[in-house]
Image (tube, helix red, strand yellow):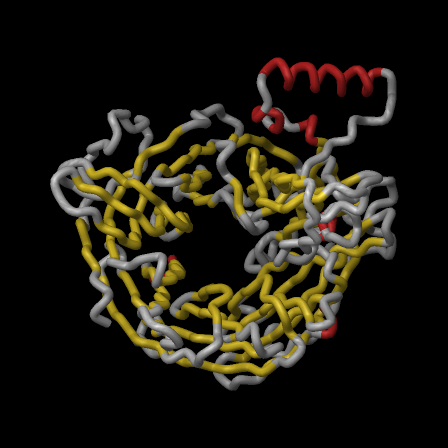
């Protein structure tokens, strides 16, 4: 396609030349390679999918030519280890379809499309990164509505969807090769159900964690399903005898057959807010007794050394002292008001797991004018803000408010051993400007080969990051400007849709639209891909 033009600036590390008169931190990552596409956000949409196992990056581009009623064109591009263009393949997408999500498994990238004008109409594009073949497969499910989650498993897709009745959610099993599909009746749940999952691709199975509530207490139900036919292999309940409720959780990867660690959040009387974390070892015993229940370990936020690092020191000290006084006189503990978004558990070299949990709050703007705006939530399991229960954009008590996004304040990082014992914790404080329109991960975690962890996010043209070495203190405000040239400095005047994704070999892939003004040349508008290695 002639409107696309890739510029591979370098396959070697870029020269350490700051585009601002601010020296980079001593532990700044290397900016290995960069590719620019002459695309404009007014006419082009770009989706990026890394394939770490194949050291490749797949890019899906939708181009809409100027003019009325012109059919958009699509192209798939594949880039190699140094962001050199390996292959470019046009793709025919029928009119009316819009891309929803991308995912991948070794060797194959998937793009899931949906036709918003025809209920239940889906389309999958499967791209073979080895041979370059493209397979387009339509599905007419009739009952599915919004797509809220996607995982790939050996040629099949597990798709979390809401249903046309707008009251329930389920999981669709799509066989991309044959075009067969089925709804999984074992996962037919109300919209307010928290739903997380892990997949075992080699074994062809997936395990789901579902929340179940009676309005006062909440428990978790674990279901393991066959990805080939969607049959329930086994299920088990995890609940507490105390006043605590289990809100949501993540399971350790199924590939590790020696451990089944479940870690998540728990609440007390108000199920909207987390009071801390819990963890438990679900490993099956050789001869389990009928009442042999897994031991649940609970960790109030006050138990963490670094959870309140996001507060000013004086504020944090007063809060800790107040909590200690209540504990000394055996009064009820302080009730925290935190919402946590959990990342998938990350295996550690010592056999334990690291949990990354983002602390966020919904943001609103208020108006005296009537605004019956419905909830913007495209994700399920967060009905605390539904317009039907008084916490949504429309407040039943008379004040109108419009949802503006989710602000992530800080990130809790903690390590557990295989039995669920807390080993260490750390914290990453974010800028006040990190606000997203959807409830999605604002920070990306990259597990390094030496066992350390990097947390990072893009804000405008800056990469903000923190290196985590268990509970050891480290700089919390490290940042580096993304370089656009190995030559004279260039000024980035605008950044749109910045995105950061973990890749292979201790590397992130950064991407987004940039408007760049060189010192002695014409301004250019580009979409960029850039490798950043720690």
Quarter of the view holding residue 116: bottom right
In this rendered view, identify the residue nearer to me: 191 or 281: 191
In this rendered view, identify the residue nearer to me: 351 or 68: 68
Q: Residue 228's x, y, as percent? A: 59, 77
Q: Is 43 placed above or below 249 here?
A: below
How many labels, in total?
A: 0
43 relative to 117 in the view: left or right: left
> Going 35% across and 45% down the picture, which residue do you hit?
495
Viewer can see residue 342 = yes
- Furthest residue toward front: 369
Viewer can see residue 295 = no
> Going 40% across and 61% down the picture, which residue do you hit?
47
In this rendered view, identify the residue nearer to me: 482 or 516: 516
Q: Is 251 placed above or below 103 here?
A: above
In which quadrant of the rendered image does the C terminus lie? top left
Q: Is 257 placed above or below 75 here?
A: above
398 relative to 101 in the view: left or right: right
Q: Residue 138's x, y, as percent? A: 50, 82
In which quadrant of the rendered image does the N terminus lie? bottom left
Q: Residue 309's x, y, as percent? A: 57, 24
Q: Is 385 placed above or below 323 here?
A: below
> Going 58% across and 35% down the picture, which residue do you hit?
412
Quarter of the view holding residue 330: top right
198 relative to 1 in the view: left or right: right
Q: Residue 136's x, y, as percent? A: 43, 80
> Going 32% across and 44% down the picture, which residue do you hit?
532
């Amino acid at each position: 396609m002639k409107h696309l033009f890739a510029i591979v600036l370098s396959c070697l590390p870029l020269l350490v030349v700051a585009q601002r008169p601010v020296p980079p931190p001593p532990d700044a990552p290397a900016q290995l390679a960069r590719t620019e596409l002459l695309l404009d956000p007014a006419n082009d949409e770009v989706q990026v999918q890394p394939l770490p196992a194949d050291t490749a990056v797949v890019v899906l581009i939708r181009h809409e030519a100027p003019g009325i009623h012109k059919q958009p064109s699509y192209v798939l591009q594949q880039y190699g280890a140094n962001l050199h263009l390996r292959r470019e393949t046009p793709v025919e997408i029928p009119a009316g379809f819009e891309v929803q999500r991308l995912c991948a498994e070794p060797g194959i990238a998937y793009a899931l499309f949906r036709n918003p004008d025809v209920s239940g109409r889906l389309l999958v594009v499967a791209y073979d990164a080895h041979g370059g073949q493209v397979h387009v497969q339509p599905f007419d499910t009739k009952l599915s509505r919004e797509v809220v989650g996607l995982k790939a498993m050996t040629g099949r897709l597990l798709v979390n969807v809401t249903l046309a009745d707008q009251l329930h959610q389920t999981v669709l099993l799509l066989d991309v090769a044959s075009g067969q599909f089925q709804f999984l009746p074992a996962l037919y749940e109300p919209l307010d159900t928290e739903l997380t999952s892990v997949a075992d691709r080699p074994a062809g199975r997936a395990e789901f964690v579902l929340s179940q509530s009676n309005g006062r207490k909440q428990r978790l139900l674990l279901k393991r399903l066959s990805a080939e036919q969607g049959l329930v292999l086994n299920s088990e309940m995890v609940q507490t005898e105390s006043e605590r409720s289990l809100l949501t959780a993540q399971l350790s990867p199924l590939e590790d057959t020696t451990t089944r660690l479940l870690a998540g959040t728990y609440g007390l009387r108000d199920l909207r807010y987390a009071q801390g974390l819990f963890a438990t070892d679900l490993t099956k015993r050789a001869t389990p007794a009928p009442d042999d229940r897994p031991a649940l370990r609970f960790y109030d936020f006050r138990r963490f050394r670094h959870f309140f690092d996001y507060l000013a020191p004086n504020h944090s000290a007063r809060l800790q002292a107040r909590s200690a006084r209540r504990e000394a006189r055996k009064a009820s503990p302080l009730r925290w008001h935190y919402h946590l978004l959990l990342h998938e558990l990350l295996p550690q070299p010592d056999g334990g797991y690291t949990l990354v949990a983002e602390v966020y709050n919904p943001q609103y703007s208020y108006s005296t004018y009537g605004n019956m705006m419905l909830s913007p939530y495209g994700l399920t399991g967060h009905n605390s803000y539904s317009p039907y229960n008084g916490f949504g954009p429309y407040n039943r008590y008379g004040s109108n408010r419009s949802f503006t996004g989710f602000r992530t304040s800080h990130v809790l990082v903690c390590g557990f051993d295989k039995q669920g014992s807390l080993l260490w914790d750390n914290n990453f404080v974010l800028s006040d400007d990190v606000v997203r329109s959807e409830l999605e991960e604002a920070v990306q975690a990259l597990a390094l080969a030496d066992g350390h962890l990097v947390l990072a996010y893009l804000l405008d043209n800056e990469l903000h990051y923190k290196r985590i070495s268990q509970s050891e203190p480290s700089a919390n405000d490290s940042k580096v400007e993304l370089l656009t040239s190995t030559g004279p400095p260039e000024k980035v005047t605008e950044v749109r849709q910045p995105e950061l994704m973990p890749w292979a070999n201790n590397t992130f892939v950064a991407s987004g639209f940039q408007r760049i003004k060189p010192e002695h040349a014409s301004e250019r508008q580009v979409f960029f891909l850039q490798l950043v290695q720690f």
